[in-house]
Amino acid sequence: MNGYELREPGVKESAAPRLQMQRISKAFPGVQALREVDLDVCGGEVHALLGENGAGKSTLIKILGGAQTPDHGTIRVDGRSARFPTPRAARQAGVAIIYQEFSLVPSLTVAENLGLGREPHLGGWVRSGIQRRQAQQALERLGVQLPLDATCDSLSVAQQQMVEIAKALAQEARVLVMDEPTTTLMPDDVARLFHVIDELRQQGIAIIYISHRLEEIERIADRVTVLRDGQNVVTWSRGDWTRQTLIEAMVGRQLEQEFPKQAAPRGAPRLVVHDLRRGDTVRGVSFQVHAGEVLGLTGLVGSGRTETARLIFGADRATGGSVSLDGRTLRLRSPRDAIRAGICLLTEDRKRQGLMLGRSVLENFALPNLPSLATAGVVNVRRERAAWAGHAQTLQIKVPTPETLAAHLSGGNQQKVVLAKWLQSQADVIIFDEPTRGIDVGAKYEIYLLINRLAQAGKAILMISSELPEVLGMSDRILVMHQGRVTGEISDPRQATPTQIMRYAIG
């Protein structure tokens, strides 16, 4: 989809590993996070690290980055034994980790970020000329051009990512870890990132690549290692795996198909949106969603998908148009109006907009449902717990106790908690905005089954997603947006292709 062409593997069987992690074990109170895990990466190789949420990937990378210490095991870099009691020790050994949350200082310039902590100075004064030359050299190694005097908060996400990679190269990194690097990137930016990764390969950098997007693994990985329940499952070289075998290795069972779409009886229109407008972000959007229908809504970042959902949910005020539910025109001045009318929104950023991470799952579940869970203004604890228990069982939410903080759940279980609170509200229209972002393949499958059940129950589903295989695999009908307008409709997703969607998406 992004135009990146696959190249030959960059590692030979006889190549000596740049990094070796052997028999790494780590336990936390009540949890064995890692059990004798092995991982090795050669210079010039992209080694994908895969597994479901909770498989142990994050713990292994934190150990490699010096954020945690292993209980047992050894680490070698270029054949030499290494210990990383601190992140600084890992960096000094040539290990750099680019997390999903960038470590840049937004108010500093590109040059200043690239030299942070290594500033050339004389008599206590930073020698800015030398700093700029060093920054330019690091960017040239990537083959990218960025304004050295621009502050990082003025850059796009893709440009900030290039600064992160350049910073790693400036620190003489020989092992580079990329954790979900394409989550917020547009297709063109993904293609550029893959080109940069190929350049790093040619320079002999050893790359560990973590992603839930299997199409990326198929494009760029020389080898893959799958973890499950804190243990090695398998390590395969290119040509030894398929998309299906990767999925089955991660979840530990066979899945009949990646997208288990089941058609539901289609009823009358429930949600009707007519000529919805708000400035330049949403410009005359009209559509309808029927009972039992999953309407996919897609488009590039900035196309107006999420902005449309926020108008329907009352989070933003429309400047024109109307929203109707079951033939009744709604006045949506706030999310409370939408919730009372029977509309709910699972936001794309569940951690910041969908949940209070510092509160328990029970509190998160109850918050929008207090009127139905209270008697004379006082929450009925027995009713609250019974309602939660019912949804937790139906949705198979894995949580130690209802008092567990939402922050401690995996991404898939967090998404289910958000869904549980909306199901308790008896919503008739459910808007999923990026329902499986950052969720492993096993949890994705469960979310897809839930979407099927909701459609079978006569709910109207609006599913917003930038994952084209997901849109094609789970939608009954697809709308594509570009610059605030609907630019195309696909009535039979089974006969459509990602290329067709992209034509509409670029206008």
Image (tube, grey):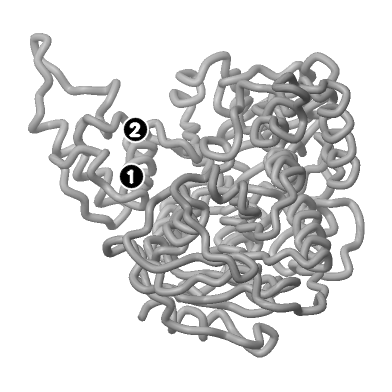
Q: Quadrant of residue 124?
A: top left
Q: Quadrant of residue 467?
A: bottom right
* Label placed on residue 104: 2
Question: Where does residue 12 sit, x and y in percent of width and height?
Answer: 62, 59
Q: Residue at x 47, y 45 (%)?
A: 334
Q: Mark 1 and mark 2 in contact? Answer it, CB < 8 Å.
A: yes
Q: Residue at x 66, y 90 (%)?
A: 495
In whole angstroms, how far apart are the C-alphas of marks 1 and 2?
8 Å
Above or below for 268 versus 491: above
Q: In this image, 504 relative to 475: left or right?
A: left
Above or below for 494 versus 165: below
Q: Amino acid at mark 1?
A: Gln
* Label placed on residue 160: 1
In the picture, the quarter occupied by the C terminus is bottom left
Q: Amino acid at mark 2?
A: Leu
Q: Quadrant of residue 398?
A: top right
Q: Earlier in the sequence, mark 1 or mark 2?
A: 2
Q: Residue at x 71, y 19 (%)?
A: 70
Q: Which residue occupies the foreground of this view, 170 or 329? A: 329
**Residues packed near mark 1 inside 10 Å, few (<14), some (14 to 19) or many (20 plus):** many
Above or below for 281 versus 131: below
Q: Is residue 479 visible?
A: yes
Above or below for 265 versus 62: below
Question: Where does residue 299 sit, x and y in percent of width and height?
Answer: 46, 70
Q: Is residue 9 visible?
A: no
